[in-house]
Amino acid sequence: MAVLITGTPGVGKTSVAQSLASTLGKKYVDVAKLAAENNLVKGFDPELQAYIVDTSSVRALLEEILTCNEVVDTHIVECVPKRKVTHVIVLRLNPLELKKRLEARGYPNRKIAANVEAEVLDSVLIDAVKWFGERKVFEVDTTGKSVGEIVNIVRLVLEGKGRNFKPGNVNWLENFYYLLGKT
Ligand SMILES: Nc1ncnc2c1ncn2[C@@H]1O[C@H](COP(=O)(O)OP(=O)(O)O)[C@@H](O)[C@H]1O
Ligand SMILES: [Mg+2]
């Protein structure tokens, strides 16, 4: 089975996906790298300082490449052919922590704000449920967990023990005092 590791930029997709792939003996597929290497970009968004990926071309390429034994890493779920993945894991991270990580990356303020807002509003989760259907989608709060701990949770989900990780188990808005740093 192929697994998609997704989530807002900075939540830890690449760290978790690479570790999961080596643990399970699967191939790691970095969609952003694949798009860049094959020049499947439509332009550059100056506001977000990011390349605009040609999602349908990337999807067509992944349709050819994926053999159902990969761990795929992208925040753009529409890039991934629906039938090729059995499990979609949306990594979640406390937005305050995410902000710190994106600052450490040196992202411009607008890009940090857009990504923190996307995390608060469940944007990637919603995209994932719309694209793949709720049955395949799980979300994991990674806040305060090591990469190894997160990988172990993903392995539980893959073994069919993902009941506690269905969409809706993470809700940053419910804890908005947390967002204001008043915990
Ligand atoms: N579980 C974790 N705990 C602490 N730091 C982490 C964890 N996972 C990733 N990081 C760090 O956060 C940053 C973003 O991680 P990365 O895997 O590149 O995220 P993404 O691929 O989603 O953008 C990196 O500096 C990485 O070392
Ligand atoms: Mg990454």
Image (tube, grey):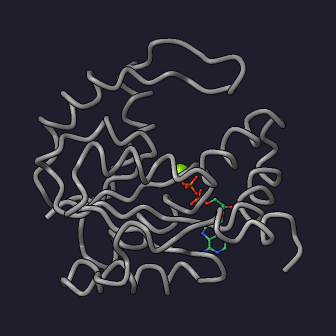
Q: Position of residue 37 (x, y in %)?
A: 40, 28
Q: Position of residue 172 (x, y in %)?
A: 63, 65
Between 62 and 124, the one lying in front of the other is 124
The image quadrant where one finds the N terminus is: bottom left
Between 168 and 12, the one lying in front of the other is 168
Between 49 and 67, the one lying in front of the other is 49
The image quadrant in which ligand 1 is located: bottom right
Judge left or right: residue 47 versus residue 25.
right
Between 26 and 113, the one lying in front of the other is 113
The residue positioned 30% from the left and 44% from the top of the image is: 130
Where residue 22 sits, quadrant-wise, is bottom left
Outermost residue, front direction? 174
Q: Position of residue 56 (x, y in %)?
A: 27, 23
The residue positioned 42% from the left and 61% from the top of the image is: 90
The image quadrant where one finds the C terminus is: bottom right
71 relative to 82, above or below: below
Outermost residue, right direction? 182
Judge left or right: residue 102 versus residue 124.
right
